[in-house]
Image (cartoon, rainbow, N blue to C red):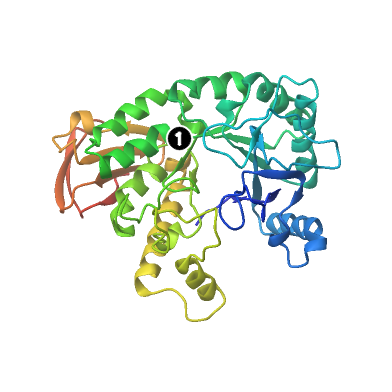
Amino acid sequence: LGVTHIWYTGVIRHSTGKPFVKGRPGSPYSISDYYDVNPYLAEEQDNRLSEFKKLIKRTHSSGFKLLIDFIPNHVSPDYGDQHGGIPTFDYCDYDWTDTKKINYSHPDTWGKMYDIVRYWAAMGVDGFRCDMVELVPPEFFAWMIRKIKEEFPEVIFIAEVYEKHNYWRYIREVGFDYLYDKSGLYDTLMAVYRHGGTAEAITWNWQFLGDLQPNMLNFLENHDEVRVASPEFAQAPEKAYAALACSALLNDAPFMIYFGQEVGENASDCSNNRTSIFNWKSAKSVNRLINEIHGEKGLTRRQQAILTRYQDTLALASEPAFRCGQVHDLGYCSPMDRYRQFAWLRYNDDSMYLIVANFAEEDAVVTVHIPMSGEDVRVKVAACDYIVRKLK
């Protein structure tokens, strides 16, 4: 799949088995000890930190880098650690009743939170997905990121940011390496599928981001969002291919796959089209994938076809023209249905590719004008799918 980083979610210890927790295991964002890992993740609970260190070593020896969550805004009401705890207010944000908000005006807070990040970076963690950063003073993050990178220059920081008008600030001023593009490309694609949105809005989002585009983290799923193959998004994994192309092939941004997405997991065992993070759930397609990996009867023919499509798409995304080439939007100069089709070029000095995504529920014959050569190219694109044609 061309994966470079693995984000292990819910590693840091959170509250479980308490009256205030949400779900049976509790929320992985209700932190009870920043210096510990969840005992239920370990084969031998008393050796859980040792096991996690071995996981880091296995991850690195397999050629991957490793990310974990850093939850900077709130902790569990029963938080405690061997370093004296975290200063908090006696209230929570939103309906997160299983948390208390961290007090960044307390003189000890900045240093304590820096020490936590340094603890994990020194253990070998390569990066941090930082939760709900807009609820934390940006001055803290600017200080903390700069200070961590002085000692660990290769460590990356990914911010969960929801307000698009804050994107520039958190990249250029605060210093995050990447931002979740939830409010940009993800919401744009969701609107095309579910809310009557136009494919032309992909252009508008691309223009809005400008030179921030390489700092976005594109995705079609994460632990907060509905499954792309669920009824609330594309309705079937095969109908998500047009969105896959726009997320993985449109720009230089990295693309994130979420647990089982690559084999069509649709969260059919859950009531809200998400794979729950608050209760124990078994993703059926992932179990089949595990069996396949271990040589047992595993993926169905349909799941294997979905996996192959993801492999082909992400192999293409690794080609130089896609990984670091130029982008040319073709919608403005081509006589296509800009409401349901979107076309673009990816190219460098050596090669050029035409990509056409069709969001319509029926097959389409699309005429695309190539300004560089002055020619018109006609391509047939299946419903909710995309095609790639190499032009050079």
Give the side of residue 14 with respect to residue 267, left or right: right
- Which residue ends up furthest to the front in the rendered image? 19
Q: Nearer the viewer, residue 196 or 14?
A: 14
Q: Is residue 315 visible?
A: yes
Say few, some or many: other residues with alpha carbon within 10 Å of mark 1 (under 14 / 14 to 19 / 20 or more): many
Give the side of residue 332 with respect to residue 74, left or right: left
Which residue in the structure is indicated by mark 1? Answer: 181
Q: Is residue 351 visible?
A: no
Examine the rendered structure and indicate whether residue 283 appears above or below residue 341: below
Q: Give residue 288's position: percent from left, percent from top.
A: 48, 72
Residue appearing at x 35%, y 56% in the figure: 229
- Number of numbered discs overlaid on the protein picture: 1
Residue appearing at x 43%, y 46% in the figure: 225
Q: Nearer the viewer, residue 73 or 390?
A: 73
Examine the rendered structure and indicate whether residue 108 appears above or below residue 257: above
Q: Give residue 390's position: percent from left, percent from top.
A: 31, 48
Residue type pointed to by label 1: Asp
Q: Nearer the viewer, residue 151 or 166?
A: 166
Q: Give residue 74's position: percent from left, percent from top.
A: 65, 35
Examine the rendered structure and indicate whether residue 302 appears above or below residue 364: below
- Which residue ends up furthest to the bottom in the rendered image? 296
Give the side of residue 34 with respect to residue 337, left or right: right
Asked which quadrant contains residue 304, the reply is: bottom left
Q: Secondary structure at mark 1?
A: loop
Q: Give residue 71's position: percent from left, percent from top.
A: 65, 38
Q: Quadrant of the C terminus?
A: top left
Residue appearing at x 30%, y 48% in the figure: 242
